[in-house]
């Protein structure tokens, strides 16, 4: 799976701002884009649920909020989650269902009385309940692909739903996201389905969906972005030195020489405000030392490489 590498100056600017501030700086545009994507898909999902699962339910967007993607996992048993991958990243859409929504879907599928409230699930999901949750997630994935503008490059089918320990252990790549909450409701019971998408991808899609449209709000957002980009930050470049035991470090003496690692020159990291931005190559140009930007820093990949290397 290829990572979401910025491919244009605009995407690179969004990447740097997110690394430094934790968000894109355009919250209204992000939430509007997320709401639009889900509201376009919701009617088709509702029809597919009625046809495929015989669920006569309402499905409405009830809220949109900015979140950190690493924080969207639901707490407790009885919930389900899946992550739809795409051609631009491993976690384009994170979907979750709460215990009430799953209980409602299972009851309706197996002929439960629609006028009687359904008790939510407070345990590990059974294989049957997992299958029902997976089918609902698949309906959403299909609808998003059919009604979306294609900038997410979503890959179907949606992975099987996970819950319990599998969900708690699933590694979500952190980043700024937008979470859309939908109410799945029958006549006597209701539950919640949530879709979370990365902010950078939402901005990319909203820009592609409305080329040339620059109203007053867009002009002010552009001016705000220009002011942000003129802010001064201090850059720091660091290189890995060597691996030592604590005993070796404790015995270091004044004047002692320490050799750089063989690949240290190509593993310099460029940072600002204690946020690592790029992996660089250390070098020299005339009498001045330099760093050449190689690629954006991937915190998830760096963590994995550290674990493999035992850092």
Image (cartoon, grey):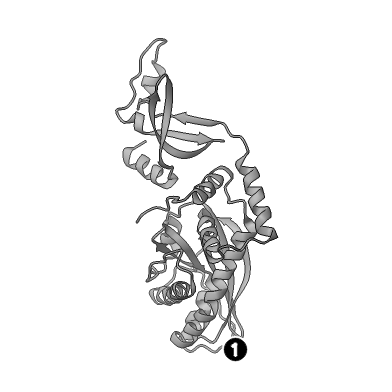
Q: Position of residue 232 (x, y in %)?
A: 61, 35
Q: Quarter of the image for the N terminus: give it.
A: bottom left
Tally the marks.
1
Residue depicted at x 50% and y 51%: 11
Q: Quadrant of residue 284?
A: top left
**Direction left: furthest residue:** 262
In this figure, which residue is indicated by the disc labeled 1? 115
Q: Secondary structure at mark 1?
A: loop
The answer to whether 299 is drawn above or below residue 165 in the figure is above
The answer to whether 286 is drawn above or below residue 23 in the figure is above
Residue depicted at x 57% and y 47%: 22
The answer to which of 141 and 128 lies nearer the viewer is: 141
The answer to which of 214 and 143 lies nearer the viewer is: 214
Q: Quarter of the image for the C terminus: give it.
A: top left
Q: Position of residue 241 (x, y in %)?
A: 38, 26
User: How would you rate the neighbour count of disc 1 (Cα within 10 Å): few for under 14, some for 14-19, many for 20 or more?
Assistant: few
Q: Is residue 20 visible?
A: yes
Q: Quadrant of residue 291?
A: top left
Q: Position of residue 82 (x, y in %)?
A: 44, 66
**Direction top: furthest residue:** 255
Residue depicted at x 52% and y 55%: 200
Q: Is residue 178 left or right of residue 134?
A: right
């Amino acid at each position: 799976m290829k990572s979401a590498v910025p491919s244009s100056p605009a995407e690179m600017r969004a990447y740097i701002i997110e690394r430094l501030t934790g968000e894109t700086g355009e919250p209204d545009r992000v939430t509007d884009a997320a709401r639009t994507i889900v509201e376009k898909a919701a009617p088709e999902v509702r029809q597919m649920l009625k046809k495929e699962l015989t669920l006569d339910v309402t499905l409405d967007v009830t809220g949109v909020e900015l979140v950190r993607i690493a924080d969207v996992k639901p707490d407790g048993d009885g919930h389900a989650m899946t992550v739809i991958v795409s051609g631009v990243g491993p976690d384009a859409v994170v979907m979750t269902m709460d215990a009430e929504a799953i209980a409602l879907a299972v009851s309706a599928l197996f002929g439960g009385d629609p006028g009687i409230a359904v008790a939510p699930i407070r345990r590990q999901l059974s294989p049957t309940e997992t299958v029902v949750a997976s089918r609902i997630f698949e309906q959403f994935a299909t609808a998003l692909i059919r009604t979306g503008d294609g900038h997410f490059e979503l890959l179907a089918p949606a992975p099987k739903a996970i819950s319990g320990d599998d969900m708690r252990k699933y590694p979500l790549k952190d980043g700024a996201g937008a979470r859309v909450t939908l109410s799945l409701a029958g006549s006597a019971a209701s539950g919640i389905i949530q879709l979370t998408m990365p902010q950078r991808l939402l901005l990319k899609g909203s820009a592609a969906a409305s080329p040339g449209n620059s109203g007053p709000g867009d002009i002010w957002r552009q001016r705000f972005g220009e002011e942000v980009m003129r802010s001064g930050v201090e850059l720091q470049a660091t290189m890995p030195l060597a691996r030592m035991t604590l005993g070796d470090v404790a015995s270091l003496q004044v004047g002692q020489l320490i050799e750089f690692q063989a690949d240290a020159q190509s593993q310099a990291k460029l940072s600002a405000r204690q946020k690592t931005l790029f992996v660089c190559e250390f070098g020299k140009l005339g009498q001045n030392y330099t760093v050449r930007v190689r690629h954006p820093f991937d915190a998830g990949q760096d963590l994995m490489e550290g674990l493999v290397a035992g850092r």
